Amino acid sequence: MPVTQAQHAAAETLSDEDLVGLARGRDEAAVRAITKRYNRRLFRIARSILRNDAEAEDVVQETYVRAFTGLDLFRGDAAFGTWITRIAMNEALGRLRRRRPTVDWETYGVNRHQAEIINFPASAAASDPEQTMAQGEIRAVLEQAIDELPDAFRAVFVARIVEGMSVEETADLFGLQAETVKTRLHRARVLLRAQLDKQLGPALTSSFPFGGQRCQRMTERVVSLICTG
């Protein structure tokens, strides 16, 4: 039976803990609510590592498949948002390492062994107005400046400023001390230059968009894989 609009709306008000419980039973409304809640964060974190929209989107889909097929592995030791974001980070780092075997895992607060401990089942095998908007001059300049930051600073900057995660959430995600997060963020700001930060700061929250059609498309793909596969 198709999920009603009321069921969608009700699911979106639930806590992560309640949604996870429902998603374990392949509840479609819960799966949709989780993907809509975390699409943007996962995309932004993956892209901060890979610096490629298409690859980051692939990482988001793979992350959901791994997470939803491995929910029994989620014990609640960390917040669900942190847990699923770590899966995305590990997936992105794994892809980056295949491209650059010498990549420094500790740059992202992950050591080589920790990045390999989460084993999940393998996944099943026209223009976008939002993407067009993202090509605007101001956003393009800003995204290029962020992409050129050193790895360690870029990941923290995207998590803290672009995605709006707290210092504590960012420290927990990357396995860093809070003071280290603050230091990296400060150095990232300096590298982006004070003038760029001053002029384009308000645009940061709309960088690397993953809403609208892209968000809906990702949700539909995940629901198809998880709930109707």
Image (cartoon, helix red, strand yellow):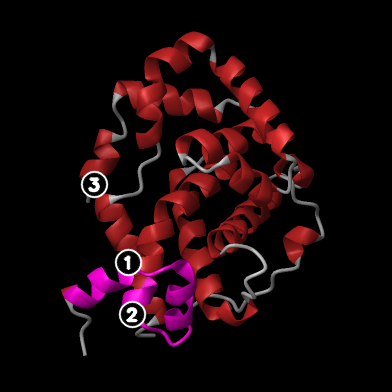
Quadrant of the drawing holding the C terminus? bottom left
When the figure is inspected, residue 21 is found, relative to residue 76, above or below; the finding is below
Residue 188 in picture, x, y percent from top left = 61, 24
Question: Quadrant of residue 209 in the image?
Answer: top left
In three-dimensional space, the C-alpha distance between marks 3 and 1, rounded to whole angstroms, equals: 29 Å
Q: What residue type is labelled 1?
A: Thr
Quadrant of the drawing holding the N terminus? bottom left
Tag 1: Cα neighbours inside 10 Å, few (<14), some, or many (≥20)? few
Could you say which disc has been placed on residue 128 in the image? 3
Could you say which disc has been placed on residue 133 in the image? none
Q: Mark 1 points at which residue?
A: 13
* Residue sitting at x 61%, y 53%: 89
Residue 213 in picture, x, y percent from top left = 25, 54
Q: Name the residue under label 2.
A: 28
The answer to whether residue 118 is seen in the rendering is yes
* Residue sitting at x 41%, y 22%: 201
- SS type, badge 2: helix
When the figure is inspected, residue 151 is found, relative to residue 137, above or below; the finding is below
* Residue sitting at x 65%, y 57%: 90
The stretch of residues the image draws in magenta is: 6-31
In three-dimensional space, the C-alpha distance between marks 2 and 1, rounded to whole angstroms, equals: 15 Å
